Amino acid sequence: MKNIVITGGTSGVGFAIAKEIAKEGHNIIIVGRHEYKAHIAQKKLGNNVKVAIGDLSDEAEREGVIDEIKRSFSHIDVLIHSAGVLPRNASENIYVNLLPHYYLTTRLRGLLANSRVLIITGHPQAGKKIINAKTVLIASGGFAQNRAMMSVYAPDLLRLGTTNHPGATGDGIKLATTAGGALVDMNKVQVHPTAQQETDHIYLIGERLRGAGAILINHLGKRFTNEMATRDQVTKAINDLHQDGATLVFDQGICEAFKAADFYVAMGLAVSGNTIYELAEKIGVNPNNLEKTVSSWNMYQKAFEDIAFDRQTGMDRGIEKSPYYAIHIKPAVHYTIGGIKTNRLTEVLNEIGEAVPGLFAAGEVVGGLHGDNRIGGNSIAETIVFGRQAGQQAAKHVLSLS
């Protein structure tokens, strides 16, 4: 029976690892910041699991976690670092994700002698460091922010911005290939048709706004497509305008039905008007055209028959309740469909389809799952299903090592 400490063990991949290890009857301490969540996880995991509560980025709380671990274990067989946040910048990554793990590991060094597996992060100020690990799980995201990789795999999209986070730089993909992993579908990159790009940050304006009843108009104030078509089809329709994007139009009723619209308004992404005519003047389109467009749309919506573009969904409400809103949008790179080749067990495969021992991957870093065009929302299912699977399989591999 082994003594195992898992940071971030109260949720996500860390919890999945803890759950798999708990089945083997090992002694486990899960570390988490939130007491309620930790005790819920402990209850689910069983009697062999203890909790240590504390934010590892806070020195005092980290010392409390260390004291709790030392009270429970005189020796640690496996230390798994899973805690962390999605960093907004490099500084946050260093001080919230990297340094806390480094300090925790060094403070527990006396308990780690002859430990079989130690998964840690290196000290960010110590330069490059090679960490020899027998089990590695890559969940680092895609490569939308890496312009060099984009120039190789999707050069025609370099002109576009991206809704993806700053950490989507493809490092995990490079790591996998260095270890012998194969890649698949790397030239398949999904573009999202509706991203607001007039502010410092690119904001994705989700499909649900159109699903709640919003319409798209061109610079003449007229509809030009079925707004509920697939992402690639709507993107093509916008590009075929040969204008600087298009504009989403909606009303207060749609805001009430889709609460995220309140965020768009609060962030200053939307222009508002008390009437359609006033809104049209503010966004620089022909007011008479926009009034006619909205009137026609309301008629189609009431009849539930869009005779202009055959839209068949997102027709539960019209655009009739003041104030009225508009958001100027343009297509942006959203998701890199290609990535590391894996099997259903999330094992990374080499060029001839064999598993690379001890190497697992999950999330956007993986390719070959979504075909040519990922359906909106499927990435959530992907992260839940394969993130859990990856955690379980990585844990099994760790425990199988002699």
Image: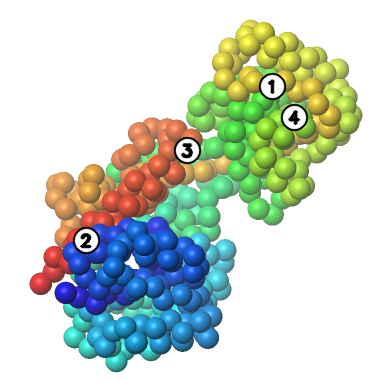
Q: Quadrant of residue 287?
A: top right
Which sits earlier in the primary sequence, circle 2 or circle 3? 2
Contact? badges 1 and 4 (CB < 8 Å): yes
On the image, numbered disc 4 is attached to which residue?
253
Closest to the observer, 126 or 306: 306
What label does residue 23 carry, if any?
A: 2
Q: Quadrant of residue 116?
A: bottom left
Q: Quadrant of the C terminus?
A: bottom left
Which sits earlier in the primary sequence, circle 4 or circle 3? 4
Observer able to see residue 88? yes
Q: Amino acid at mark 1?
A: Arg
For image coordinates 28% across by 84% down, the residue present is: 73
Which sits earlier in the primary sequence, circle 2 or circle 4? 2
Q: List the single residue furthest toward the left.
A: 402
Contact? badges 4 and 3 (CB < 8 Å): no
Which sits earlier in the primary sequence, circle 3 or circle 1? 1
Horizontal side of 135 relative to 121 (left or right) equals: left
Q: CA distance from mark 4 to mark 3?
A: 24 Å
On the image, numbered disc 1 is attached to which residue?
317
Q: Quadrant of the N terminus?
A: bottom left
Q: CA distance from mark 2 to mark 3?
A: 32 Å
For image coordinates 48% across by 50% down, the residue present is: 144
